[in-house]
Amino acid sequence: MLDRRKALMLPAGIAAAAAAERLLRPSPAAADPASVKLNDDGLHSQPWFETTFLDLKEDHAEAKAKGKTLVIFFEQRGCPYCGEMHKVNLSKPEIASYIKENFYALQINLYGAKTVKDFDGTELEERKLAERWRVNFTPTVVFFPTDPAEVEGKSGRDAEIWRLLGYWKPFHFLNTFVYVKTEGYKTEPNFQHWLAEYREKLRAEGKDVSLW
C-alpha cells in the first residue's frame, strides 16, 4: 500500500508533488483571509464541513451510509494558501456543490489539541495525528476508500487512497475530487495523465476546461 500511495500523490512521488504545488500556488497577497469565515480555532471554514466527535471509524461509517466518500482537510491558523483555497476554490458553487454532494468533509487543525480516534482505535491529539500521518504543511487534503474493509484496523496513513498537497488551482482542485469519486486512480495511478485524458474528454463534449 505504501508504494501505491506514493504513486498516487503525483508522478514521481513527493518531490514532484512539491514541485507542482510550487507551480500552482498563488501569491499570498492575492488572498484575503479576513473575508473568509473563521471558526473557533481560527481556521477558514465552510458551513458544510461536518461537526463530529472525530471518531474516524464512526465518521467513515456515516459517510458510507450517506453514499459519500470521507475526506479530511488539514489546515492551520494564518495559512494563506488555506485562505486561498476557501476564498477562490470553495467559493465557487460548482466546486462546493460537487464536494457537498459526494464527500463527507472533516477539518483537522494541524496544531490542534482536540482528541481524534484514528481508524485503528488509537486516540491522540490532532497535532499528533498529523505527525502520525506525516502531514507536514497545509492545506493537505486526504481521501479514504468507501469500503469499510479497506480501513479496518489501519491508521489513516495506511488507509488513505489519495492525498492532495498544497494549493491547487480550481480546475485541478475540483478534478482531484472527480478523480477520487470516479475511482480514476484504480485504472490510472498517475493523476496528471488521468487529468490530461479527462480534460480532452470534457473539451470534446464542449465543456469549459479553463482554470477559471
Image (tube, rainbow, N blue to C red):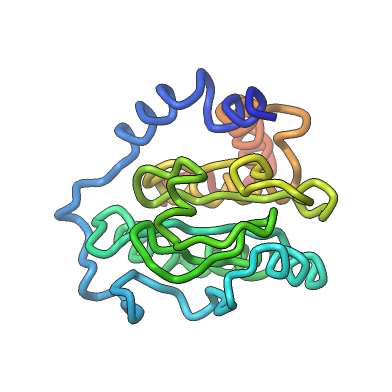
Q: Give the x, y percent position of residue 181.
A: 71, 51
Give left or right: position of 183 versus 139.
Answer: right
Foreground: 150 or 102? 150
- From the top left corner, tell me how far across and down residue 36 is, in percent: 30, 74
Q: Position of residue 77 (x, y in %)?
A: 27, 64
Q: Nearer the viewer, residue 52 or 95?
A: 52
Is 95 above or below relative to 178?
Answer: below
The quadrant of the picture occupied by the N terminus is top right
197 shown above or below 172: above
Q: Tell which of 141 and 134 is nearer to you.
A: 134
Q: Is residue 59 left or right of residue 135?
A: right
Question: Going 61% across and 39% down the picture, which residue do you hit?
Answer: 203
Identify the residue at horizontal 36%, vertical 36% (top origin): 21
Q: Which residue is at the far top?
A: 12
Q: Residue 117 falls in which quadrant of the image? A: bottom right
Q: Residue furthest left?
A: 29
Q: Measured from the top left, where is residue 177 in percent x and y?
A: 61, 51
